[in-house]
């Protein structure tokens, strides 16, 4: 199960969207709007990164969130000439503590602000894991020739002590799926939500131990899929904040999800880095091979044309495995084409969905004819072990 939320679709008059001229200095907008989830009236202050002709807005707020505000929800709007300034770590910490129930504290590391109500040790374990992942991720894509850099402001992570408190908070994002999702990245708020895995029943329900105990517990084979989920979600967050991918443009699922699964296998034993980036992700590979042997692989055209297979519970796991295989193949054997494709996606306009034909054309332009590429893909993947 995956918590990555693609939220391109909303009620802005998309056909009438007018982008802002580049080089314009940002005025600060003060907007009063109705929150669609709670129907509360909220005051927002930020920069308009997109304006629709009917008055709808996408507002970027200093905490890194993107608010999609259809005209029908905007009550008032005023601009002033104050410059837009992203919140620093201290200000982000204060904002999180102001929003969360009592009992939360904040752990800050170089690139993360972790709000938690579990042990401080677990928060430290989490930020250490994510710092290592981020460092490795950036080093990896630089080596691949991509223009990536550390995020402009620290990334926010919420760690709840247990599943119940997490589910209570997360249900407004996930609805009834909350029971199956152990962590997720929200593209709108730009935050990751998760809970303390060492408190789970599967691990005896209460191993609140030292850093050594946590590492021991989460290095066990039965913990692997749980930790992989955290890493998967953290990879989405890093990817959308280091310049590799852009939020609110038409990112195909086969690409975003395949990229996250490519990084999913953590090497917890290594304190230095993710030495295993680019290694075969065996849980995805096994399923891919199994489907191949059964003659049930997903044709490339179907994977590329739309996101349906990823959004349907019955087909999602197979689609993720197939997406892992394709990203593995493309990153390994077509690295320059892959980097150029990523760059072209990041340059797409905000909130414009691509048709199936456009998606397939974009793919073909970067990687060549589908049939030919598919033949090479199966030839090469048959030799992976
Ligand atoms: Zn994902």
Image (cartoon, grey):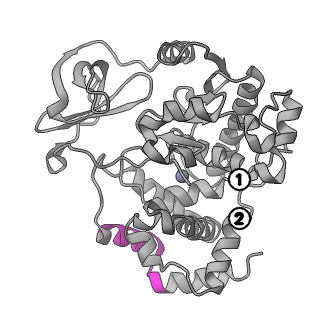
- How far apart in space, not on screen, are marks 2 and 1 (Cα)? 9 Å
Q: Which secondary structure dominates the residues rendered in magenta?
A: helix
Q: Residue at point 44% right, 82% down?
A: 369
Up/down of 198 relative to 80, above or below: below
Residue 305 picture location, percent across and down: 37, 71
Label 2 Cα neighbours within 10 Å, binned few <14 / some 14-19 / many ≥20: few
Near-viewer residue (301 or 22): 301
Q: Could you tell me which secondary element the residue under label 2 belongs to? A: helix
Residue 190 magenta: no
Residue under label 2, please give it: 283
Note whether residue 356 is visible.
yes
Front-most of 231 and 367?
Answer: 231
Label 2–label 1 contact, CB within 8 A = yes
Give the residue displayed 58% in from the left and 87% down from the top. 295
- Which one is in front, 279 or 73? 73
| Left or right position of 27 against 223 | left
| Residue 150 seen in render | no
Question: Residue 225: which disc?
Answer: 1
Highlighted magenta segment, given as a residue range: 358-371
Of residues 244 and 35, which is closer to you in this image? 35
């Amino acid at each position: 199960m995956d918590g990555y939320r693609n939220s391109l679709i909303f009620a802005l008059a998309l056909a009438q969207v007018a982008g802002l001229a580049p080089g314009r200095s940002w005025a600060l907008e003060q907007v009063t709007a109705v929150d669609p989830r709670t129907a509360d009236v909220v005051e927002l202050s930020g920069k308009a990164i997109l304006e629709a002709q009917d008055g709808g807005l996408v507002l970027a707020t200093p905490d890194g969130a993107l608010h999609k505000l259809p005209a029908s929800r905007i009550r008032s709007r005023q601009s002033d000439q104050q410059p837009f300034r992203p919140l620093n770590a201290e200000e982000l910490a204060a904002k999180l503590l102001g929003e969360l129930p009592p009992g939360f504290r904040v752990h800050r590391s170089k690139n993360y602000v972790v709000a938690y109500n579990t042990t401080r040790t677990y928060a430290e374990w989490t930020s250490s894991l994510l710092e290592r992942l981020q460092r490795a991720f950036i080093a990896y894509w630089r080596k691949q020739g991509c223009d990536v850099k550390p995020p402009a402001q620290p990334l926010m992570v919420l760690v709840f002590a247990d599943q119940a408190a997490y589910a209570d908070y997360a249900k407004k994002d996930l609805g009834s799926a909350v029971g199956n999702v152990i962590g997720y990245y929200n593209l709108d708020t730009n935050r990751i939500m998760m809970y303390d895995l060492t408190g789970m029943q599967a691990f005896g329900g209460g191993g609140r131990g030292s850093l050594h105990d946590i590492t021991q517990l989460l290095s066990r084979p039965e913990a692997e899929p749980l930790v992989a989920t955290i890493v998967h979600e953290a990879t989405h967050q890093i990817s959308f904040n280091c310049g590799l991918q852009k939020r609110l443009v038409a990112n195909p699922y086969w690409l975003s999800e395949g990229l996250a699964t490519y990084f999913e296998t953590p090497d917890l034993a290594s304190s230095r880095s993710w030495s295993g980036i680019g290694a075969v992700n065996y849980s995805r590979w096994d399923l891919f091979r199994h489907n191949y042997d059964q003659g049930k692989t997903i044709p490339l055209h179907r994977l590329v044309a739309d996101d349906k297979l990823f959004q349907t519970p019955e087909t999602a796991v197979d689609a993720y495995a197939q997406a892992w295989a394709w990203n593995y193949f493309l990153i390994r054997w077509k690295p320059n084409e892959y980097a150029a494709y990523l760059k072209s996606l990041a340059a797409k306009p905000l909130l414009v969905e691509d048709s199936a034909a456009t998606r397939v054309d974009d793919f073909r332009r970067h990687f060549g004819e589908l049939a030919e590429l598919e033949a090479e893909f199966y030839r090469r993947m048959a030799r992976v072990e």
